[in-house]
Amino acid sequence: MDTEKQIESISFSVDAGLVNRLGKELVGKPETALSELVKNAYDADATVVDVIFKNADQIGGTIIIDDDGVGMDLNQLEKGFMRISSTDKLHSPKSKKFARSKAGRKGIGRFATQRLGQSLTIVTQTVNSDRAIKVTINWNDFKVDTDISLVKNRLEYVDKTKSEGTTLIIENAWEYWSEATVTRVYRYVSDLFQPNYISKKALELKVANKVDSTFKVSFVKVENGQHKVIADPNTMLYNKALATIEGFIDDNHDGYCQVLSNSLDVSKDIIPILHEKQYSKDEPKSSKYKNLSNVHFKAYYFIYQRDQYYTGITKQELANIQKLANEQGGIKLYRNGFRVLPYGESNDDWLLMDKRNFYDSGVNIPFGNRNLFGFVEIIDQKGEFFEETASREGLIENDAFIELITFLNKSFEAAKKTLRYGVEAIKNKIKEERRNHDLVESESIQTTIEKLFALERSVNDILDFNDSSAGNIELKSSALRIIREIKADFQSLIDELGMLRVLASLGLTIGEFTHEVIQFSPSMMGDLSVLDNQNLNAEGIRSLENLRRTIRLFTAYTAYFNATVSANINRELRPQQLTKVVLHFKNIIDSDIQKQNLDFQTETYGYELFTLPMHSSEWSSILFNLYTNAKKAIRRQGVAGKIKVILGRVEIGSKVYIEFLDNGDGIPEENRFKVFEPFFTTSSPLGFEATDEEKLGGTGLGLKIVKDIVQTYGGTVEVGIPDPDYSTCIRIELPEATSKDKERYAV
Amino acid sequence: MPYKILYIDDTQEELEKGTINGLEQGGEISIIFSKPNFWETQLDQIKSTIKDFDAIILDLRLNEKSFDGGANFAKYRGSSLAQELRTLSKESPTLKDYPIILVSADQYMEESLDQTSHDLFDLIIKKSHIGIKKNCLYPELQSRIKWLIQGYNNLFQAEKTPAATLNIENLGLIDFRFIEEWKTQLTKPIHVMAGFFTKKVIDKPSFLINELTLSARLGVRLDSKDWVVLKDKYLIDCKYKGIFSDTYDRWIMPAISQWWEEKISNNESLRVISSSRRVELLKDTLGLKSLTPLEKQGKSRSDSFWVICKARGYAIDTTDGFTLAKQEHIFPWQEREYISIDEALDQSIEENWNLVAPIEKDRLRSLQEIYKKSKTRGQK
C-alpha cells in the first residue's frame, strides 16, 4: 500500500507557534524587550543608538531602533538573526570592533522584537556592502500548526541609508509607551554608557574621529512631527548634575573657570585661574599659562547620597549615576579629537583627585574622580605643545602637560571653594527646615513608613533588571516579603505606642488629680471629728458612721494613686525586696480588699528576696495590673474571691520569684502565651448596656506591660500552675541581686 | 483662753475650713487662717502680730496657688518662711518663740526636707495622715499642739537651769553627760531647746521611758488590774514632772532602778531576772495581787524583757532584738530602738524602720539559715 512511505529516518520540525510562545515566555516586560534590543546594538559595536517612539502613546504605535553598529550581511542575517538559538554569541563572546563584553542575553533579540509589536522590518547594511537588506516579518504569520520553515518573510535589497548599522522598525506595538516606562528602559541600559565628549569645536575642525569606544542611547518621542527627547545622557546624566564646572585657557594664555548650578546657590562669576609661576629668575610671577592655549574642559559634578541637594533627581537616579561613575567617572583627555588613554579610565588618577580627596578633611565637598564626569580637550594641531609617548599610552610629561595639570587642579580648587559655600548653605537650609517642623514625632513616623515604601520601590526597581531568572525572582519575592513583614510589625508597634501614650497621659492626669484631692482629706476628717463629739440621735450616728467609712475608702484610694504616682517620680534603680514590695502594695489596696471581701494572703519561702536593681515604681504597675486582672477574673467567675501572693527563691540560676494566684475563671491552655500579647483580651466586644467598669476594663495591654517590664530586667513571666483552691497563677521570675548589688545599694 | 494659732496655707475653695473645725473643736484652740502673701508683706505681718500667737502652722508648698484668686503667688516655701522666723527670734530674744508645725500634701515630704529644715519644725505631718492615721487623729493633734505650746511657755518662763527645767529632786541620778549637754542647750533659743528635748528625750527612749517600756521593764502586763495602782501610786516619785511632762507620761529610769533596789530587792537585779520573778517580787513586797507577768512572744527566747519591738509593740529582751540601723550616733544617755526576731525575719509593718544595724547583719543571716527549713515549699 502506498499510503505508507518508506521512511528510513525522521527529523524534528518546529511549529511556528513556538515563536510566539517563546517570545511571550522568554521576554517578560516590554521594557526588558526594548533594553535587549539596545544591548544588541551595543554588542554590534554601535556608538549611537536612537530609539524613536512614533505615536506610541496608544497601542499600535511604532518603535524604531536605529544604530550605527557593524550591521549584517546576508550570511550573517541568515546564520544569525534568522536562526533561532544561533551559536553566534558562543563563537564570539566579545564584539569585533571594540572588544566589548556582550551585554545582550543569548539569542532573545528576535523574540524581543516579537514581544514589542506585531510586525518587524529590519534594514541592515555593513560597511562593505553596496546595498542594504530589508526583511519584513509579520509575527501573526507564525501560526500554530504551521511548520516554521514554511513561513516566508519577504526580503528585498534597498539603497543604503548609512555606511553601516541596523534599523529595526517595530509596528503595531502591543503596548503603549509612557515617558516613565521609557525612562525606566534608559535606566536599564544606562550602565552601558560610555561618554563621548567631543565638542562642537573639534567637530568643526574636523579633527574628531570616532576611534575609541563610546556608547550613548537616546530615546526620542515623535508626535505630529515634533521631536522630544525623553531620555538621553543629557537629560539623564549631565542635566542632573549638582553643578557643572567649565573652564578654558584662551589664546592669550589666560585661564578661567566657571561653576554653574541649578540647585546650589553659587556665584556664576567667571573665576580667573592665575598661574602664579615664575618662568625665569628675572621676571615676576606670571598669571599666564605660557605653554597652553586652546584648552577647554568641562565636568559634571555629583555628590552622592544627598538627593536633597539637587532639584529634579530621585534617590534611585542618583544611585544609578553613582554606580555608573565607578566605571565612567573621571576626567578624560582628548587631544585633537582623539581620546588619549589612559587618562580618565576607571583606575587612573592623573589629576591626583582621589589622592587629594582622601586627605581632604572637608568631606562636605567630596572631589574624587567618581564625583566628576568630564573631559579636557586640547587643540594642538601642529603638535607644538604636546607629544605622545612612544607606546602611545599617554603624553610625555613636558612643561605643557605639567601646566595643564596645574591649571586643572587650580580650577577645581576654585570650583570646590565656590561649591563649598553652596553646599553649606543648602545643608543649613535643610537643617532649618527640619527644625521648623513642629510635628517632629509624627514626622519621623511618617518618614519611617515612607522609608519602607521607598525601600519597597527600590527593591522592585533593582530586581527588575533581569526579572525572568528564577534566582532573582526568588530573591525579589523574599525581599518583598520581608519588607511587608517589617511594615506590619512597624504598624502594630505604632498602634501599641499610640495606646500607651493615651494611657500615659491618663496616668499623668490621675497624678494631678490625686495631688489636688489630698488637700480635701484633712478638711473632711476635721469636720467628721467635730461631728463625732456631737450629741446625735441614732440616725445621725448611723449616718456619721457611714460617712466616715465612705470617706475612708475615698482617701485610701487616693492614697494609693498618690503613692504610685510619687513612686514613679523616683527613677532610681535599687534592689527591691519582694516582701517589702508586696507589703507596701497590700497596705495600699487594703480598703479595696475589704470592700471586695477578698481573702488576701501572702506566703514567703526564703529570706532576703532581693531583685536586681529596679525602679520601685514599676512594681506598682506589675502588681496593680495583676491585681486588676485577678479581680476581673473573680468577678466573671462569680465566687468569693481569694488572692494569694507567693514569694520565693529559685536556687538554680539565682532568681527570685513571685506568683500571683486567684480563684477566678482561669486562663485556657491555648491562651497561655496569647495573654501576653498586646490588645489580646477575652473581654467580648461590649454592647451598649455594658457597665462603665466593663468598658474601662480590657485595654488588653495589662499583661503586655507586665511582660515588657519584666523582660527589660532579664526576667520571665508565664502562666504557671496554681495551687489547689486557685485557678490562675501568673509566675514572674527575676534575677536576684548579687552581693555586689546589695553592697552597693546598702541593702 | 484658747491658744491662738496662725495657719498659713494656699488652699483654694475654703478647703481649710474643715481642718480648722477639727482643730478648734473643744474650744481650746483658735485658728487664725491666712493665705500666704508676698515675702516682705508676710514677714511684716507675722512680726507685728506674733505676740498674739502661740503657734504657727505652715503648709510646705505655699507657692502652688495664687493667694488672691488672681495672678499673685507666693514665691517661697513654708520651710523658707520658717527659717526666716527662727532667725528672727534668734536675733531678738524678747521676740516670742513658738512651735512651728509643718503640714504638706507631699508624699515624700520628709525625705525631701534636709536635716536642717527638719530642725526648724516641732512637728511635721502629712496631710494624707491627718484624721486618718492613728497618731494623727484630730484629738491627738490637738493634744500634741497644746503640749508643745505649754512646753514652750514653761521653757520661756523657767530659769534656764537643769534643776528648774527638769524638776528632778536628785539630779545626780541623771547621766551627767546629759546634764552637761542640757546646760549648753539652755543657752540657745527656745525653739532649739524645745526641739532638742522633745525629739531626743521625750520621743525617743532615753533616761525617760514611756508606759509600754515601763511595763516591759517591770515585766507586768498593762491590762493587769493593779497596774494603775503600781504606776500611779508606788512609782509616783519616779514620774517625770519637768518641762514637757504633761500629756505624755514619762518615768525616770534611773529613779526606777533606784526604787527597785531600795524598795523591792537589792540583790536581784531587775535587768537580769525573768518577768515572772519580777512580778513575784513586786507582789510580795507591795502586796499587790493582780499583776500578771508578760510572756515571751514568737521566737523570743528570753523573758527578761527590757525594750519594746518598735514594729509589733510587744516586750522583748535586747538579746531577742535587733537594733535598727541609723542609730550609730546617738547620745550616750539615749537608748537604742529594737525590733523582734519575728519582725526581722518577716516584716509585717511598713514603717520607717528599714534595716537592722550593720552590726546585726550576720546574726540575722544565721537566724535566717536556721529558720530556712520551715520556709521550703512543698512540691506542687
Image (cartoon, rainbow, N blue to C red):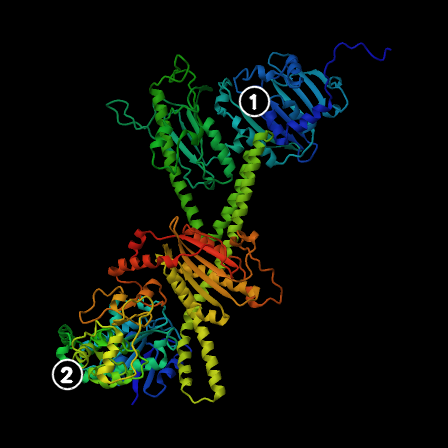
Q: Quadrant of the image for the C terminus of chain A?
A: bottom left
Q: Please, what secondary structure does the residue beneath circle 2 have? A: loop
The quadrant holding residue B345 is bottom left
Residue receiving disc 1 = A42
Q: Quadrant of residue B194?
A: bottom left
Is the residue marked by circle 2 packed among few (<14), some (14-19), or many (20+) residues within 10 Å? few
Query: Where residue A662 sits in the image (x, y, percent)?
Result: 50, 62
Residue A394's image quarter?
A: top left
Instruction: Answer yes or no: is residue B161 visible.
Output: no
Looking at the picture, tell me which residue is in the foreground, A155 or A602: A602
Quarter of the figure with the N terminus of chain A = top right
Which chain is disc 1 placed on? A
Report the front residue among A254 and A689: A689
**Vertical relation: A614 (above or below) A247:** below
Please, which chain is the residue tagged with disc 2 on?
B
Give x and y (percent) for residue A532: 41, 84
Q: Residue B134 carries which label?
A: none
